[in-house]
Image (cartoon, coloured by chain):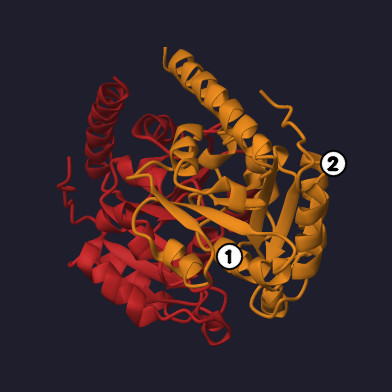
Chain colours: A orange, B red
Amino acid sequence: MRIVAAKKLLKANDLLAAENRAKLAAAGVAAVNILGSPGAGKTTLLEALFAALAHRARPAVIEGDIAGALDAERIARLGVPVVQINTDGACHLDAGMIAAALADLDLQAVDLLFIENVGNLVCTAGFDLGEQMRAVVLSTVEGDDKAVKYPAIFQGSDALVMTKCDLLGHTNFDPARVAADYRRLAPDGRVFEVCATTGDGIPAVAAWLLGSEGSGRERTET
Amino acid sequence: MRIVAAKKLLKANDLLAAENRAKLAAAGVAAVNILGSPGAGKTTLLEALFAALAHRARPAVIEGDIAGALDAERIARLGVPVVQINTDGACHLDAGMIAAALADLDLQAVDLLFIENVGNLVCTAGFDLGEQMRAVVLSTVEGDDKAVKYPAIFQGSDALVMTKCDLLGHTNFDPARVAADYRRLAPDGRVFEVCATTGDGIPAVAAWLLGSEGSGRERTET
């Protein structure tokens, strides 16, 4: 009974996600769903990417948080259009929330839309938001066993961005182990290592985003 | 409709949690629910606590993970009784899972039962497992805005354990900010700062656990 309800819910989400995807494609906007644990460094990664993308693509952000608008305030200070979604307790964004947020953005003035999901390595995985790309952010201080322990979120992704690489010397995190685990789950996924606070590795992520921009690739999972 | 279903589900969980609590109390076992993000350092904290508790309390562990048994293998290597729960995708433990796991433990040989929840700062908050104590683990590399962004999990807790304090000099994490935010959410909660790999701060957490042991305090939220 509970399973049937969950499937119905996901089906409704997929219909809304398809509408979002069509709306974004019509406006020439490439959207990337940014997933990761609380504190993985998602917002700091966005801040670094804005600098790398300057004069090459016009960014905008949809921020998903349980409560508050701390992240949206950080983005707004950089002059980037941002809409904050408060999920009011819900552990992930869904396509309906994104549809509402899209109505508050001038899509004609946007090339790349970053959707920063709620910090959660589990629940965010199952919900298509209508994005073209899905990137998982994993910090080097979270431990290198995460792809094995939380496989679903990595499976559906197009890229893995390992953040806080400046702290590698202070932990027992092995990026090669994570990359190998990730490739088993997402054979075509790109792997990046960055330090967003220094900018190391950020240009490669920006180039990937720009290369994917406007490609209009449909997500294949249903 | 969805809200009603969720409430029913939580009510069933509370009944099972009450049964777990009675069973644990009858056996003289104090149980602590350990919550935190993926990679917060929950398992490493347990490893450090076993050493500090040696000859003073007999520990056992219930490990909750989406997939795999990596954490249970770490615990078992230390000779501590451990039961692994695989939630098979579910984002939190519930009281029914704990009831099943308790049947696999010899409670007469246990003083302190650690229940390591799924790494998730959102969904784990709402489910009483029948524990006496609830501790949230937050690492100093997750950012010091987490109590504001994920308030529910801190609100229901008895202690906050800030881990990876050896990395404090390498981040902009302000423990005082987190402690102040935490006290607004949990005025009676204890605050600890530890480095589990060196053992710094661990004796204070062990003393808190030993002091609470057998106190039989009921959780008051419903």
Residue at the limit of the structure toward the bottom, as seen here: B169
Tell me the element at label 1.
loop
- Seen in the picture, residue A201 relative to A151 is either above or below; the reply is below
**Foreground residue, B55 or B190?**
B190
- Seen in the picture, residue B32 relative to B191 is either above or below; the reply is above
Left or right of A213 on screen, residue B85: left
Q: Counting other residues with Cα less than 10 Å from the Cα at mark 1, is it few (<14), some (14-19), or many (20 or more)?
A: many
Residue B113 in the image: state x and y as whole percent.
Answer: 38, 50
- Seen in the picture, residue B216 relative to A81 is either above or below; the reply is above
**Type of residue at label 2?**
Pro
Residue A179 in the image: state x and y as whole percent.
Answer: 80, 54
**Foreground residue, B133 or B171?**
B171
Chain of residue at mark 2: A
Residue wearing tag 2 = A187
Q: Give the quarter of the figure containing the C terminus of chain B.
A: top left
Residue B131 in the image: state x and y as whole percent.
Answer: 29, 46
**Type of residue at label 1?**
Gly
Q: Please give the label number shown on residue A41.
A: 1
